[in-house]
Amino acid sequence: MMELDSIECVSSTDGIDEDEIHHHNILHHLPHHHHQFSSSKPQNVGINGNANSNSNIVGPTGIAPATSVHELLECPVCTNSMYPPIHQCHNGHTLCSTCKVRVHNRCPTCRQELGDIRCLALEKVAESLELPCKYYSLGCSEIFPYYSKLKHEGICNFRPYNCPYAGSECSAVGDIPFLVSHLRDDHKVDMHTGCTFNHRYVKSNPREVENATWMLTVFHCFGQYFCLHFEAFQLGMAPVYMAFLRFMGDEIEARNYSYSLEVGANGRKLIWEGTPRSIRDSHKKVRDSHDGLIIQRNMALFFSGGDRKELKLRVTGRIWKEQQNPDAGVCIPNLGS
């Protein structure tokens, strides 16, 4: 274990040591926010006013795809790009295979029966196209064949992030600066600067555990943002408490950092050490994989002391940056001077 004074960044969160975060304060009464995509970079607006529409995105070569061709490849029902099999009616109107089922085999344009006619000519046209990634305006400069583009966009590093707030089904998406502001202003999440933390979690009736019992705090250190989650949920028949850290960025960047969590009292302690998960992984995915500090209820009550009728857990931890050793090819802790 590293000594605390070896961390590069010194926390300024000492003032929260004695803050008791009570269960009735954890569940904020927030409205459900329904945000459109937001980014600190400009967006292109294309056909039908849709942001980032491919018809209006100019690739790095400065050549925009022909609007008429793009419109031909746009499904008239869902307006998404069509991929094989592309269907057509006897009058030549096309639509995607997903929407063919939705319209009950009737052409949405002329109402004629669709049958099973493939538009092979349009599929061939699509095969010859090369288009920029739809996240070009956010920084992606890649150009792909039409049929490879969709797969890339599902894993593009420049695609927007989902809101990491776990207490509601928030639909906000955007880049990291937008989400940090969104968490602070819309969800009223506590923001702290520093790489060490010390929180107390208090619950009056530890035998009543709901999945919605959670806490989120955002930490800013090493020029990055981290989400500290603490919550209670049912594991089998017994309630457990779990704390874990998520990195506000991609998985590859997250591997540059490590963190530790510790909880204990009465001469006993539990320690967890690991790599923060990217917020590309949903909160539920991380929780259900048990990738964090898990405290069984009996142990949590033991740490709380007293008459075991109130939960009082102090969770401490720290974040540090790993440094690549060029000789050994392995990561070593980045010790402060």
Image (spheres, grey):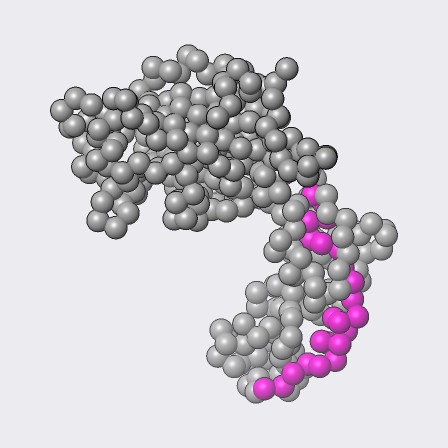
Please report the residue visible at 59 percent of the width from the left and 86 percent of the height from the top. Answer: 116
Stretch in magenta: 116-138
Q: Nearer the viewer, residue 107 or 219?
A: 219
**Residue 322 seen from this side:** yes
On screen, 17 above or below 41? above
Side of 308 relative to 1 (left or right): left
Relative image position of residue 236 (x, y in whole percent):
25, 50
On screen, 148 above or below 306? below
- Quadrant location, the C terminus: top right
Side of 9 relative to 134 (left or right): left
Q: Nearer the viewer, residue 95 or 21?
A: 21
Please say whether residue 103 is one of the residues in the magenta stretch. Answer: no
Relative image position of residue 257 (x, y in whole percent):
57, 33
**Residue 177 seen from this side:** no
Relative image position of residue 281 (x, y in whole percent):
50, 47
Please report the residue visible at 62 percent of the width from the left and 43 percent of the height from the top. Answer: 252
Relative image position of residue 184 (x, y in whole percent):
48, 27
Q: Residue furthest front?
A: 328
Please say whether residue 126 is one of the residues in the magenta stretch. Answer: yes
Please report the residue visible at 70 percent of the width from the left and 64 percent of the height from the top. Answer: 148
Q: Residue furthest left?
A: 307
Q: In the figure, residue 151 lies in which quadrant?
A: bottom right
Q: In the figure, residue 326 lies in which quadrant?
A: top right
Q: In the figure, residue 271 lies in which quadrant?
A: top left
Q: How many marks?
A: 0
